[in-house]
Image (cartoon, rainbow, N blue to C red):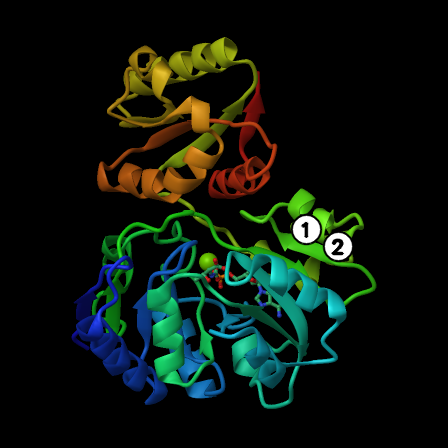
Amino acid sequence: MKTVYLQLDEQHIDAVALHALKEAGNALANGALVAFPTETVYGLGGMAFDKEAAKKIYAAKGRPSDNPLIVHVAATEDVKRLAKDIPDVFYRLADAFWPGPLTCVLHKQNEVPYETTGGLDTVAVRFPSLTIAQELIKASGGFVAAPSANLSGRPSPTTAAHCKEDLDGRVDYIIDGGSAVLGIESTVLDLTGEEPVILRPGFITGEMLQDVLGRSVVTSSGMDEKDPRAPKAPGMKYRHYAPNGTLLVVTGEADAVAKEICARLKQDKEQGLRTGVICGETKKARYEADRVVTFPEKDAPRALSKMLFFALREMDAFGIDAIYAEGVSEEGVGAAVMNRLVKAAGQTVIHV
Ligand code: TXA
Ligand code: MG
């Protein structure tokens, strides 16, 4: 298949851009796959009510089909077509955070195919904030199932170039809307139980949810086999975001972290490995590595969230064998950033 590329500017959606989005939306409605930008990461869209489209998404990504897809809408009231027994808290959260990087898991309507929900009786719903995404969803009829637009296991795509790397020739359209503003995926919140549970941390933090709900919100690790809630977040059990090289996360006091990474870089060099570091910009000069990707410490962890997936893909592009990343504070969005970083590292973290 030949992939069609559309280049659009989120800040200037004029009549020509709308026409292009209509074309891609019509293609979606007719069963095509379309990669598109959102504020979090790029998504790979197909029609949510069409089980063949869902199967095509899994095939294009090489994704296990028990890993459910998020259905994207462009209006809060459309959620009624997807979900039933919707609790009041959902509407309070939608009022506060939609459109935006919050995904809610609800009981699905019968019409939503199991192919889309990975065999579950629940459905994950999200209303993304980019105009490009919203206009595409509307043009297609309103309900777009979309996982992140990467090959399964690879870092999520934050640019159209990343989508091209993974999906060129495997999807019908790739819409380029520039770099994703947030850079990590939405918070996934389960609203089907007695109490709301965060299944995947994201930009909308537990504290932000608590402020709106007036009650505490727990986070399920999703990784713990003994955790009875683990099967509720099927995506969390797979290896994720992994670069080709081995990644080690080092946490602790800044100087001790730098010392530890330097010692390891030296050993790697002696073995002839190509090395890379992801670190705060003031530390750059301390590391002798083949590739160093930095983020401004004063804005960490927010700054790292924006460039983490980009940095991991950079390491692959430069053929790096051994990658070291400085850990960041787990406060606020830091919890989500460290969640992705630690997963990308296959849980190999050392504290110095
Ligand atoms: O920001 C995002 O959420 C991006 C953009 C494209 O919207 N999408 C995204 O999709 O990250 P994906 O498929 O890569 O991750 C969806 C996550 C997975 O961990 C999946 O297991 C979980 O959401 N999920 C989806 N439906 C679910 C359901 N019914 N119950 C529990 N977890 C669900
Ligand atoms: Mg994903």
Residue 349 higher or lower than 142, as above or below = above
Instruction: Give the x, y percent position of residue 137.
Output: 40, 76
Tag 2 near tag 1, CB within 8 Å? yes
Q: Amino acid at mark 2?
A: Leu
Question: Badge 1: how crowded within 10 Å, few (<14), some, or many (20+)?
Answer: many
Question: Which of the 4 quarters of the picture holds residue 252?
Answer: top right
Please tell me which residue is depicted at 18% across the width and 68% down the height of the picture.
5
**Between residues 41 and 261, which one lies in front from this camera angle?**
41
The quadrant where residue 173 appears: bottom left
Q: Nearer the viewer, residue 196 or 161?
A: 196
Residue 213, position in %: x, y? Answer: 75, 54
Question: Which residue position is annotated with label 2?
Answer: 213
Q: Is residue 346 left or right of residue 193?
A: left
- Tag 2 secondary structure: helix
Residue 101 horizontal/vertical position (percent): 51, 56
For image coordinates 33% across by 43% down, the residue present is 310
Q: Residue, x 27% and y 73% (percent of image)?
A: 171
Q: Residue lying at the far right in this picture: please name it.
A: 194
Looking at the image, residue 256 sits to the left or right of residue 311; the answer is right
Disc 1 residue type (three-letter)? Leu
Q: Position of residue 105 (x, y in %)?
A: 65, 67
Label 1 sits on a secondary structure element that is helix
Q: Which residue is mark 1?
A: 209
- Disc 1 Cβ-to-ligand 1 distance below 8 Å: no
Assign the N terminus to one quadrant of the image.
bottom left
**Residue 196 vs residue 292: left or right?**
right
Image quarter for residue 93?
bottom right
